[in-house]
């Protein structure tokens, strides 16, 4: 592996840096996803909706207080600031949580695009070096030419490998982000309808 790395040429160092960056982000995001899954508490979210359905907004806020479920945190924050601006509070809390889910995805997106381009750059430089030796008179020129072509192919292979191994986690994390966004939008709309119903009931009373 070390021999392949050395034969790949100078472009292998940027590829190594990109691969380490991608690996760090992937591991951190997988740990984050696992933690959020373990913190998920559907019972607390259901209790918040149940209390809000019966008009017990203070009880609904108290039910979600201290919860580590991101949906419960959003709903609790919105209930806590409902007197000033419920919609703005809901939007702020939702954006804060989605920002946590979105962290690192743009880095993987860049890696998926950049790694093949770096490999292609290694291909170009390797081919330039190889064909630059065509006019050389040394007996070892053919060997040097094939070495340059091998350099080009190694860089391309590594670039594609990094992109492919980063693409799967990128798609997985993007899917998790979209699922979180849909859950937040559904929960926010449901809570808003429950508050409107509770307000109408209080007006009739």
Image (cartoon, rainbow, N blue to C red):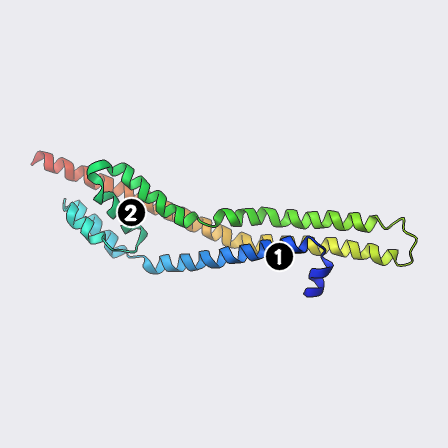
Image spot of residue 10 (x, y percent): 70, 54
Find numbered disc 2 in the image and state the secondary structure of the residue it sits on.
helix
Report the disc number at residue 201.
none
Q: Quadrant of residue 8?
A: bottom right
Q: Earlier in the sequence, mark 2 or mark 1?
A: 1
Q: Which-is-in-front pick, marks 2 and 1? A: 1
86 sits left or right of 17 in the view: left
Circle 1 Cα neighbour tier, 10 Å, few/some/many (<14 / 14–19 / ≥20): some
Q: Position of residue 26 (x, y in %)?
A: 49, 56
Task: Identify which residue is drawn at 27% across, 51% down.
Answer: 72
Tell me where residue 153 appears, x and y as whole percent.
72, 54
198 vs 185, left or right, is left
Q: Residue at x 10, y 34 (%)?
A: 203
**Residue appearing at x 40%, y 46% in the figure:** 99
Q: Which residue is mark 1?
A: 16
Q: Secondary structure at mark 1?
A: helix
Label 2 with label 1: CB-CB less than 8 Å:
no
The total of numbered circles placed on residues is: 2
Q: Can you say whether 6 is above or below 70 in the image?
A: below
User: Which residue is found at the position 45% from the left and 58% from the top?
Assistant: 30
Q: Front-most of 45 and 137?
A: 137
Residue at the disc numbered 2: 74
**Label 2 CA crowd tier, 10 Å (few <14, some 14–19, many 20+):** many
Q: Quadrant of the C terminus?
A: top left
In the picture, which quadrant includes the N terminus? Answer: bottom right
Looking at the picture, how far across and down is residue 25, in whole percent? 50, 55
Q: Is residue 11 left or right of residue 20?
A: right
Separation (CA) of disc 2 from disc 1: 40 Å
């Amino acid at each position: 592996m070390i021999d392949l790395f050395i034969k790949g040429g100078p472009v292998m160092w940027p590829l190594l840096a990109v691969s380490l960056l991608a690996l760090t982000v992937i591991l951190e995001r997988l740990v984050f996803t696992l933690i959020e899954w373990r913190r998920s508490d559907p019972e607390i979210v259901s209790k918040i909706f149940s209390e809000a359905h019966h008009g017990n907004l203070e009880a609904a806020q108290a039910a979600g207080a201290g919860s580590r479920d991101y949906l419960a945190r959003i709903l609790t924050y919105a209930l806590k600031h409902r007197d000033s601006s419920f919609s703005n509070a809901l939007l702020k809390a939702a954006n804060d949580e989605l920002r946590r889910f979105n962290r690192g995805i743009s880095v993987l997106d860049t890696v998926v695009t950049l790694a093949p381009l770096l490999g292609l750059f290694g291909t170009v430089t390797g081919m330039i070096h190889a064909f630059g030796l065509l006019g050389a008179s040394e007996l070892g020129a053919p060997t040097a030419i094939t070495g340059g072509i091998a350099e080009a192919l190694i860089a391309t292979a590594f670039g594609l490998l990094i992109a492919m191994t980063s693409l799967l986690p990128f798609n997985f994390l993007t899917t998790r982000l979209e699922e979180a966004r849909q859950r937040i939008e559904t929960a926010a709309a449901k809570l808003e309808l429950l508050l409107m119903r509770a307000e109408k009931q209080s007006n009739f009373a």
